[in-house]
Amino acid sequence: MPLLSPSHWEQQRPLAHYDLLVLGAGFVGLWTALHWLKRHPTHRVALVDPLPAGQAGASTRNAGFACFGSPTELLDDLRHEPEETIVARLHDRYAGLRQWRETFLPEELDWHEAPGHEVFTPSQTGSYHEAVDSLDQLNALAQRAGIPGVTYHVAKGISSALPHALSIAHEAGLHPGKAYACLTQALTQAGAHLHRGVALPPKTTWTKQAKGWQIPSSSGTWTADHVVVASNAWAKECLPELDIVPGRGQVLLTAPIPNLSFQGTYHADAGYLYFRNVGDRLLLGGGRNQFRAEEETHSGNITSSVQDYLEDYLREILLPGLTVSIEARWAGTMAFSSDGSKQAYVMNLGDQTYVAARMGGMGVALSPELGARMAAMIPS
Ligand SMILES: Cc1cc2nc3c(=O)[nH]c(=O)nc-3n(C[C@H](O)[C@H](O)[C@H](O)COP(=O)(O)OP(=O)(O)OC[C@H]3O[C@@H](n4cnc5c(N)ncnc54)[C@H](O)[C@@H]3O)c2cc1C
């Protein structure tokens, strides 16, 4: 049945008043709401999202890496940021992954822990050696971030195409669709209301009231004491003052491969390529850096340029000589800054309005901790 345009009656009706209204039901909105309900269990919380049940912007379309930082990513960060900033972000990511594991069972999330790897081609031997020479420094940073044991090690290369590798302890792969289902179920059980098919308009259309905000929508008028904008790549539509640039991420998934040698999570090309096993299938994603201008888009469609690039890497570097078919391809939208800053927005904007957005390519790991931080900023 095609979607109907809203009637006058549907648009012009007051809806229930909420203590907290969250705009965007991705991982960040969901974790924020869950943490706030833990603090205020009797309060009324609603989340709205234009997408149908089970879908979110990036949260149900990502690669499912439960990871916190590869060696070359950290080395690159060290060139631009003070150590304290890097340690704090590592802490948030690692603590976020622990929250997933402490809140849900491994089988609920399809959580498979195996050391992650960063892999290097022969032409990347220089950056491999730079990373090897820096392992003590990187391990010290990880320890300061609360990550136990020694995180980064020299590992065996994978093939003649990828002769160098470093291993990363505590990494895992998860099933983002199942993780999303776990979170929405936990929220519903905690009493939150999840409204689908609702896109809230920009803040300029909201009306300030004695008690919070009144927000018009095609489903009726929402009122809430506090409003959190957690719409990630779309947050700028609501709050134009934010510095948010969309970044499309594309992936492909192979058909089952007998005796697949790749088991676990792998980072390549300074983090711009990533692959992992999903059972006996191989998931490969990334390549955004090769097509920057065309990938700065909100479009969730795949493109032949990026998909061909991924497929070339799959056939030439990962599985040379093997005939394998591609079973699925998809894209999702991330949120970045225009100046390369990795700092996420977790802010009280005043006037009972808040923003939790711009998670880059790390929102699986960041969302539990940053959701908790956002919730702590919102009074009852
Ligand atoms: C291909 C790909 C691979 C990735 N791989 C990983 C990975 O392996 N590990 C990792 O940690 N991270 C990964 N990420 C990043 C991660 O998925 C994101 O950082 C994270 O999901 C962001 O969560 P979010 O809740 O902020 O945003 P989203 O999940 O995008 O949710 C925002 C929601 O806001 C809704 N919205 C938009 N406009 C409105 C409106 N007007 N009103 C109401 N709601 C609105 C959207 O519909 C959307 O559901 C990947 C991302 C992609 C695209």
Image: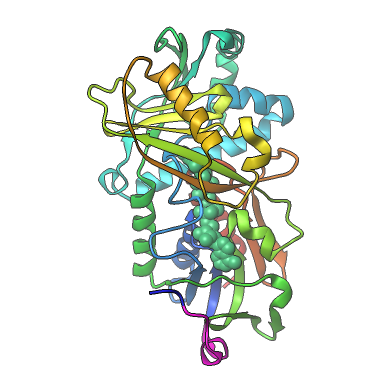
Up-down: is 291 above or below 177?
A: above
Residue at image point 74% right, 73% down: 204
Residue at image point 63% right, 48% down: 297
x%, y% of residue 267?
A: 48, 26
x%, y% of residue 117?
A: 44, 22
Quadrant where the N terminus lies? bottom left
x%, y% of residue 277?
A: 34, 30
Question: For residue 16: magenta?
Answer: yes
Please tell me which residue lies in front, 8 or 170: 8
Please tell me which residue lies in front, 116 or 101: 116
Quadrant where the C terminus lies? bottom right
Please tell me which residue lies in front, 191 or 379: 191
* In the displayed structure image, the side of residue 31 where residue 336 appears, left or right: right
* In the displayed structure image, the side of residue 94 where residue 376 appears, left or right: right
Please tell me which residue lies in front, 313 or 193: 313
Quarter assignment of residue 112: top left
x%, y% of residue 285?
A: 47, 34
Residue at image point 61% right, 53% down: 233
* In the displayed structure image, the side of residue 33 where residue 204 appears, left or right: right
Colouring mode (rainbow / by chain / secondary structure / one colour):
rainbow
- Residue stretch rendered in magenta on the structure: 4-17
Up-down: is 289 above or below 302?
A: above
The reply to whether residue 203 is visible in this rendering is yes
